[in-house]
Image: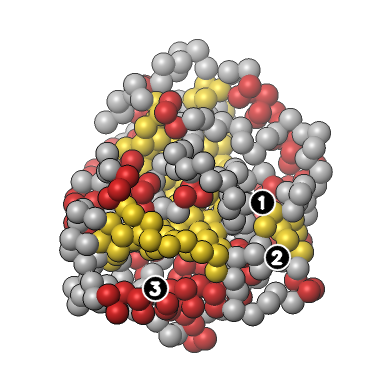
Amino acid sequence: MMEANKVEIISKEMIKPSSPTPPPLRIHKLSLLDQISPPVFIPLIFFYQDDDQLFHNINRATKLEYCLKQSLSEALTRFYPLAGRLGDNKSFIDCNDAGAEFIVAQVHGYSLSQVIETPKMEELREFLPRVYGNDDDDDDDDDDVLLAVQVNLFDCDEGIAIGVCMSHKVGDGSSIVTFINAYAAIARGQGNAQIVQPNFNLAATLFPPIDLSNSSFKPSIGMKKEKLFMTKRFVFDKEKLDALKKSASSGSQVNDPTRVEALSAFLWKRLMKASRDSNKKMFAAVHAVNIRSRVNPTLPDYFFGNLWTAALAFPEMVIGSVNTTNDDLVYQLRSAIRKINSDYTKILENGQEFMKHMGKLVELFSKGEVEFCNFTSWCRFPMYEVDFGWGKPVWVCTTTFPYENMIIFVSTKCGEGIEAWVNMHVDDNII
């Protein structure tokens, strides 16, 4: 494990928007999908090689810090809810310009290449802002921030890692990548030309918030202490993915599975086999689905908020007149995901009816009748396009989430492979 003194916090401050948020925008209503999103931070870390020694020189490093602060301040003016705080009943954000946390850290005696070649979860956490959940930090003064950035400067090989955490209550994976790309565009001086002002209000209009005080559903359902599970990273290159697609289509009703479908079915089957209770209960797959392209009319990617829902597939179910079996998991996944269409999003608009459906799933989970295997794919998000002015990242990664049996897919830099970040029980061995 990386020693604590190897990542030394140099400075920490709150960055406020460059212009005050107008009074009419002061209250940002959360949508129903915001309300039921998990109370966690979405973590991303961007690693950059300093081939031109831009960061090693003290004066240049100072200018870099100033640039990243100023551009963050400007970005917060456009993405004003990120500088606010959750209201008392967590149904709205008070856009009070309290600011985002900005940390500068120095990494001593540890090279960027070491991190990339042999990444370790406990070390990656050190590159993220404290709000992500460093257990040994007792300072809770800023726990209510919605966005935090940590700039890590490496001594050994003049590299830099930028860790960003955003509250899932504000937006989803697409939203955080949209924000970071806008932040980077401002930093390299192209903000006005390349940033479309995000829409923050449509989500709550489409999916109005409701009173959840008497609901059996709790956004924290399924969350566990991280000591109960571990996170492993598995890299599947193009050849491995092609082999999985071929295997998945053999004997399946799906002749042309996507990379994500084939890999999801493969890991779902592995986790079912590794589960200690697989013979006692159902082991369902839950796939997060971006609904921006599934509502009618469709929405562009820059629409901000939690615009996703979950597709649920069971290892055995009857679909029409076809009785699927455990061996055709890819078909069950595709069928479940395709059900998330414009008709389904209409159901989402009726919050009370949707929460009755969620209540039934909570009941199954609470009784121990079903175990969930949760998938989310970030493969199409333009994370490797994030350029702050010194080139694109050499590696982008996430890290641990407080959920067992949760898998996040991230594209490799070349775009042809997939990294699977798997949270699983400490005793499981799936591959």
- Image depth: mark 1 or mark 2 in front: 2
Q: What amino acid type should be assigned to the residue bearing mark 3? A: Glu
Cβ atoms at labels 1 and 2 below 8 Å apart: no
In the image, taking residue 10 as reference, residue 34 lies left or right, namely right
Report helix, strand or loop for mark 2: loop
Measuring from the top left, give residue 197's x and y in whole percent.
Answer: 60, 77
Where 35 sits versus 67, above or below?
above
In the image, taking residue 379 as reference, residue 108 lies left or right, namely left
Where 400 sits versus 165, above or below?
above
For disc 1, the marked residue is: 34
Q: Depth check: give the residue in front, 215 or 87.
A: 87
Crowdedness of circle 1 by 10 Å Cα count: few (<14), some, many (20+)?
many
Rendered image: mark on residue 95:
2
Q: Depth check: give the residue in front, 424 or 54.
A: 54
- The structure residue drawn at horizontal position 67% and vertical position 50%, both measured from the top left corner, is 33
- The structure residue drawn at horizontal position 56% and vertical position 42%, both measured from the top left corner, is 311
For disc 3, the marked residue is: 65
Rendered image: mark on residue 68:
none
Measuring from the top left, give residue 292's x and y in whole percent.
Answer: 59, 61
